[in-house]
Image: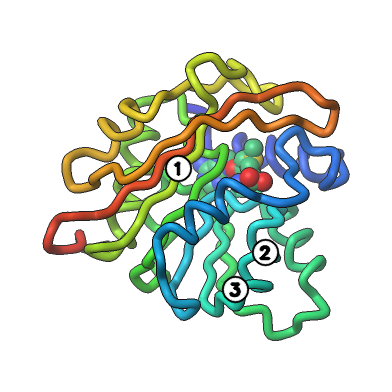
Amino acid sequence: MPSRKKRQAHWNATYKDTPTNQLGWYEEAPGPSLDLITECDLPTSARILDAGSGATTLIDALIDRGYADLVAVDISEVALQRLQARLAPEEDAPVQWIVGDLTDPDTLASVDPVDVWHDRAVLHFLTDAADRAAYVQSLRSVVKPGGYVIIAAFALDGATRCSGLDVRNYDASMISNLLGPDFEMEQSLNHTYHQPSGAPRPYVYTRFRRVNAAADPA
Ligand SMILES: C[S@@+](CC[C@H](N)C(=O)[O-])C[C@H]1O[C@@H](n2cnc3c(N)ncnc32)[C@H](O)[C@@H]1O
């Protein structure tokens, strides 16, 4: 397992070195994520947590749509500072900012239960089984019963490395198996994202609902 410090240093350096719109995962419009969040059919008061936000345009898009209770979590404070600076004119941006590692059980301790957990391009970096188990534990600690989980990861025919790191490739059933029987899959789709360089990056997107009766304690 890479140490959390090394992981954080890697991502901070990545964001320091690269303008947001040149990042290999930059989306001008986060279409599939917004579509899947819309499918959850929640009011704009719903609490949405973006796991591994980076400098994503999803937060801007959700605020534009009136969502008023967002949580942005990332291991890189450089990334979150960049996102925060972009939103600066909206001084009252309705975002709880959390710098931390999603495999650390303390990272989400201050987060109230959420209606949606969204992750695009984060889970696939967890190549160690213990890290994946810790990630699922973090997710289980905050997703409400009846809440939704949206995860997008590199597809089985997708890239095997990103940002200089190895990744684990997924299909929908692998994500379902990782989450376990308390999460029922409602939707999955394949989507080919094109990097700023034009290179295709096939992803699998999944949307689950938490069907068990009780949330886990944090
Ligand atoms: C490929 S980027 C995707 C960023 C964003 N979700 C998007 O779609 O633009 C992966 C992000 O995950 C963050 N990250 C990687 N490992 C993490 C971890 N263990 N805990 C929290 N964030 C992590 C990185 O700092 C980076 O911002």
Q: How far apart are marks 1 and 3 (CA)?
A: 20 Å
Can you tell which mark lies on residue 95?
3
Task: Mark yes or no: residue 131 visible.
Answer: yes
**What residue sits right under mark 1 in the picture?**
151
- Residue 166 horizontal/vertical position (percent): 58, 19
- In primary-sequence order, the first of circles 1 and 2 is 2
The answer to which image quadrant residue 22 occupies is: top right
Task: Mark yes or no: residue 125 visible.
Answer: no
Are dots 1 and 2 in contact, CB under 8 Å?
no
Tag 1: Cα neighbours inside 10 Å, few (<14), some, or many (≥20)? many
Amino acid carrying mark 2 in the image? Ala
- Residue 24 horizontal/vertical position (percent): 75, 33
Amino acid carrying mark 3 in the image? Val
The answer to which image quadrant residue 216 occupies is: bottom left
Q: Is mark 2 on a helix, strand or loop?
A: helix
- In primary-sequence order, the first of circles 2 and 3 is 2
Amino acid carrying mark 1 in the image? Ile
The answer to which image quadrant residue 151 occupies is: top left
Q: In this view, does 69 lie to the left or right of 57?
A: left
- Residue 76 horizontal/vertical position (percent): 66, 50
Q: Distance between the residues labelled 1 and 2?
A: 18 Å
Location of ligand 1 given as a quarter of the image = top right
In this view, 158 is above or below 130: above
In this view, 203 is above or below 39: above
Can you tell which mark lies on residue 125?
none
Q: Distance between the residues labelled 2 and 3?
A: 13 Å
**What residue sits right under mark 2 in the picture?**
61
Q: Is residue 170 left or right of residue 181?
A: right
Residue ID at (60%, 78%) = 66
Residue ID at (58%, 18%) = 158
Q: Is mark 1 on a helix, strand or loop?
A: strand
Residue ID at (66%, 50%) = 30
